[in-house]
Every structure is written in C-alpha cells, then in structure tokens.
Image: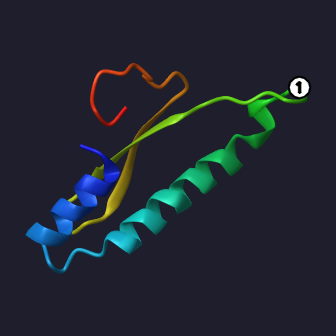
Amino acid sequence: MSLASFFRYCKETYPTCDTAKMLEDMKSIVVHTMQSVKRKINPEDRKFTFELYGYDFLIDSAFNVWLLEVNTNPCLDESSPHL
C-alpha cells in the first residue's frame, strides 16, 4: 500500500485520524536520525555522491508514529504497482 493509499484509508476509516500530523512526525524522525549520524554518513567527504535509505514506520491505534528501522539498502525492485 502506498503512503497516499494508507492516508486515504485512515481518513475514510478513522475520521479523527490526522494524517498531516503523522506525515510531519515521520519527517521529524527522518531529520533527527540523519542529524544523529551526519558525521558518519560521508566521512571521506566524497562529492557528488548519494545514498538511499529506507525508513520503516509503525502507526499505533492512537495514530502515533514509531520508527521501526532504517535500511541502508532499501528494496527497489519493481515487485508491486507502487514501485
């Protein structure tokens, strides 16, 4: 399920769900985790490089966002219509 589909499902199924807050919480978690390791990410200061990270989140019954894990090698296979 894509994030847009998940948010649409939440709004339709749980009218009190604040998807904007969930998205902001996810963004905040990403920023904080990146800040916590910024000195380790590119220690040789290589220019013109990038790395992809895959963030996995859990949403509890009160719509709180929890970080499950961060993957340094996210799956980018075209195994679903969302990819």
Residue at x-position 55% and y-position 25%: 72
Quadrant containing the N terminus is top left
**Residue 37 vs residue 19, the one in the foreground:** 19
Quarter holding residue 75: top left
Compared to residue 75, the image places residue 62 above or below, namely below
Whether residue 13 sits left or right of residue 71 in the image: it is left
Q: Residue 65, position in %: x, y?
A: 35, 59
Mark 1 residue element: loop
Quarter holding residue 83: top left
Q: Residue 55, position in %: x, y?
A: 46, 40
Compared to residue 19, the image places residue 66 above or below, namely above
Count of numbered labels shown in the rendering: 1
Q: Residue 48, position in %: x, y?
A: 85, 30
> Label 1 crowding class (10 Å Cα cut-off): few <14, some 14-19, many 20+?
few
Residue occupied by mark 1: 46
Residue at x-position 74% and y-position 32%: 41
Residue at x-position 36% and y-position 21%: 78
Compared to residue 59, the image places residue 73 above or below, namely above
Whether residue 55 sits left or right of residue 72 in the image: it is left
Asked if one can make out residue 61 in the rendered structure from this viewpoint, the answer is no
Whether residue 63 sits left or right of residue 47 in the image: it is left
**Residue 47 vs residue 8, the one in the foreground:** 8
Residue at x-position 14% and y-position 78%: 15
Q: Residue 24, position in %: x, y?
A: 47, 67
Quarter holding residue 62: bottom left
Asked if one can make out residue 49 in the rendered structure from this viewpoint, the answer is yes
Q: Amino acid at mark 1?
A: Arg
Q: Of all residues shown, which one is farthest toward the left?
A: 13
Q: Of all residues shown, which one is farthest toward the bottom?
A: 16
